[in-house]
Image (cartoon, rainbow, N blue to C red):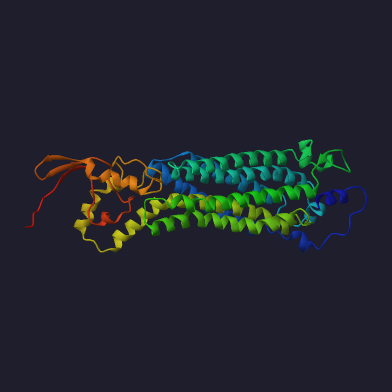
Amino acid sequence: MVVELFTRQGPGPLPPPPPQEYLDENLAPKMLAVDGCFFGMAVLFVLLRVYVRAVLLKTFGIDDWIMVLAAILSTACFSLFVTLTRNGVGRHAEFYTYVRPDLLTVFFQVAWWYAWLVVVAYTSIKISIACFLLRLANHRRHWRWVLYTTIVLLLLFTVGSVLSLILQCTPVRAAWDFSLRAPFGDAVCYSPTTYRNTGVFNSVFNLFTDLLLALLPIPMVWKLQTNVKTRISLCVVLGLGLFSACATAVYKIPLQYRFFSEKDFSGKAAWYYIWQQIEMNVGIMAACLPTLKPLAAEFFGAVSALTSGERYGSQYASRGHSKARSRPYVSNGYLKQTEGSGTPSYVLEEMDARREAASPSNQGPLGDGLAYIVGQRRGSSAGESDESILRQHKGILRTTEVSIS
């Protein structure tokens, strides 16, 4: 591996170099094209999420702030990888021996920063997802305890992983300055086997938490006050993206296991860095996808209005109510609820609690044929069958009694 390269640079003649075309081969453009594509999509998803939460809904919360942090860390990792490609990544390992041996120290110094920043980015994504699920579980104590426990485990794991990466060598500088290691110095560092096993353990733990956060929404959303179709679609949206991240992680783990025994660490084996960032950016997109439902609803609603053949008069009338419909999603930032209705969040409450609001006990007489209703207004989030027949509102309800003899 790398130590062998340094050993070859010591006293004594070097073996004959490989062919020049082999030394000139550079995989960096292909790597950057793939990495840049996923990075760009992840940033776009985060920007759309910020727009939905901060502008449309005005419900920008802690989960959104943490996702912004994850996007910043993803940007840092992408920038560091670009720096790596400028210092030999993409070229075969022999490039450092026969062409630019001075770049090897720079390569490992940048890789040292990259290694632990990726870990922090992964954790930021998962904690953001957990905080988003806390919005849905705001009335279910046992789910909140599960999510809080998951967050604590993620934080403890991250602290341990980051410290193990930062302190992999004594002194720390020996992580990138191989002149301090044997046979040139007396620095103590992890063996390649220890480093490999630590990395694989980290990846397996990340895969486990990915699966946990992908499966956890299924029992959580099954109590939502919506019909079965809506609940199934919500489970799919919340879980499908994370399952994609899990599939990426499964593919990456074997690459990681072979990476530390691969002699061409900067060439063919460097695709491992790309799969690291694909996993990270797919995770970002998966975490942002459920929050974009209000934006999708507005977009498809506008398309439907344009293609439905409405007359100018009806279009003009609909514009008069555009302000009232401009933010149809409030409360937890996902479920539809009319703004200004004064309705609190009923995210995971039992459906019977909603029916009580419109019970006869909440009505009172105002005179012959008139009554008032006190209670919560039932909107589209109720998902009950009578909604399509008659929408109930706060205010005065006129009733007419008909006697049939």
Image location of residue 296, percent across then percent down: 39, 54
| Foreground of the two, 387 or 302 | 387
Using residue 203 as the reference point, say whether residue 322 is left or right of it. Answer: left
Q: Quadrant of the C terminus?
A: bottom left
Using residue 185 as the reference point, say whether residue 141 is left or right of it. Answer: left
Using residue 42 as the reference point, say whether residue 307 is left or right of it. Answer: left
Q: Residue at x 48, y 42 (%)?
A: 134
Can see residue 105? yes
Can see residue 67? no
| Foreground of the two, 404 or 49 | 404
Q: Residue at x 47, y 47 (%)?
A: 47
Using residue 264 as the reference point, say whether residue 36 is left or right of it. Answer: left
Residue situated furthest left in the rendering: 405
| Foreground of the two, 181 or 363 | 363
99 in relation to 168, above or below: below
Image location of residue 152, percent across then percent down: 59, 39
Image location of residue 175, percent across then percent down: 77, 41
299 in relation to 131, above or below: below
Residue situated furthest front in the rendering: 405
Residue 76, quarter of picture? top right
Image location of residue 253, percent across then percent down: 68, 56
Q: Residue at x 29, y 56 (%)?
A: 385
